[in-house]
Image (cartoon, rainbow, N blue to C red):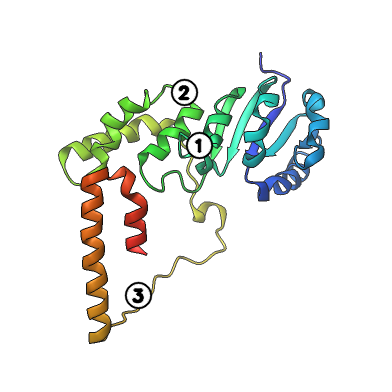
Amino acid sequence: DYRGKPALVICPTSLVDNWVREAAQFTPNMKVLAMKGGDRHDNFDSIPEYNLVITSYALIRRDVEHYRKFVFSAIILDEAQNIKNRATQNATAVKLLNGGNHFVLTGTPMENSVADLWSIMDFLMPGYLGHYDEFKANYEIPLAVPGDTIYETAQIKLRRKLHPFLLRRKKIDVAKDLPPKMVKISWCSLSQDQRTVYDKIMNASRDEIRSIVQKDGFEKSRMVILSALL
C-alpha cells in the first residue's frame, strides 16, 4: 500500500534547492526534506515523517541502500536523461528503489539513439518495451537506417507504444510571451588555403572512421565520430 508514503524526487544537484523553493510556493502545507550535504545521514530515519523527499543523482548512487529500506508513493526523476545509459550507476540505482507511481521529466529524451529511451522507459514501466536485446532487434537496429520500409514500420510501432504515456509541452504552451524562434543563416566561404586544409582533415577523418567502424562496430566508434565532427 503506497498511500501515506512520501514521494521521492531525484534531480541534478543544482536543482535540489529549486525543487524546495517550488514546493514551498505551490504546496506550502507539504513537509519537505532536502537530502543533501554531509549531515544527510542523520535524516534517513525520519524520511517517513515527510511528504516529499528531494535528493540528487550524485547522492542516490551513494545512498541507494538506505533508500531501498523505504517505500515511496511516487518516484520522480527530473532531467531523466541522467539515466539514459542503462549501464551507469545512476540508472542502476534508481531502478532499485521501491515506489508506486513513476514519473520522468526531461527535455532531451533521446540524444544519441533510441537506446536512451529504452533505459528511461525501463525505469518507468519495467518490461513494457521488452528486454534490451529484444528492443534492440525490433527498434534500435531498424531505426538506425532512416528511409526504408523497416524504418518506417518500427517508428510507427514504437510511437504507438509510447504515445499513451507521454505528456509533451512546447514552448508556446508555457512561455507565450517569448517571440517565435528566428533562424538566420550566414554563409562563410573558405579561402583556397583553408579549403585545402579542410579537405585534408576531412579525408583523413573519413578514412579513420571507416577503419574503426569496420574493426569495432558503430556503437564503439561514437567518440571517434564525434571528435571528427568537432
In this rendering, position of residue 215 left or right of residue 90: left
State the separation of the CA atoms marked 2 and 1.
Answer: 17 Å
Residue 91 drawn above or below residue 16: above
Q: Secondary structure at mark 3?
A: loop
Q: Looking at the image, which residue is at 47% across and 48% down?
A: 108
Q: Nearer the viewer, mark 2 or mark 1?
A: 1
Judge the density around disc 1: few (<14), some (14-19), many (≥20) Cα neighbours within 10 Å. few
Q: Nearer the viewer, residue 87 or 207?
A: 207
Amino acid type, callout 1: Thr
How many neighbours does mark 3 have within 10 angstroms: few (below 14), some (14-19), or many (20 or more)?
Answer: few
Residue to which mark 1 is pinned: 88
Instruction: Report which quarter residue 105 is drawn in.
Output: top right
Q: Residue at x 39, y 32 (%)?
A: 162
> With respect to residue 6, does 230 lie above or below?
below
Quick check: can you spot residue 202?
yes
Task: Please identify the quadrant where the C terminus is shown.
Answer: bottom left
Q: Which residue is mark 3?
A: 185
x and y, in percent, of residue 92 in the image? 53, 30
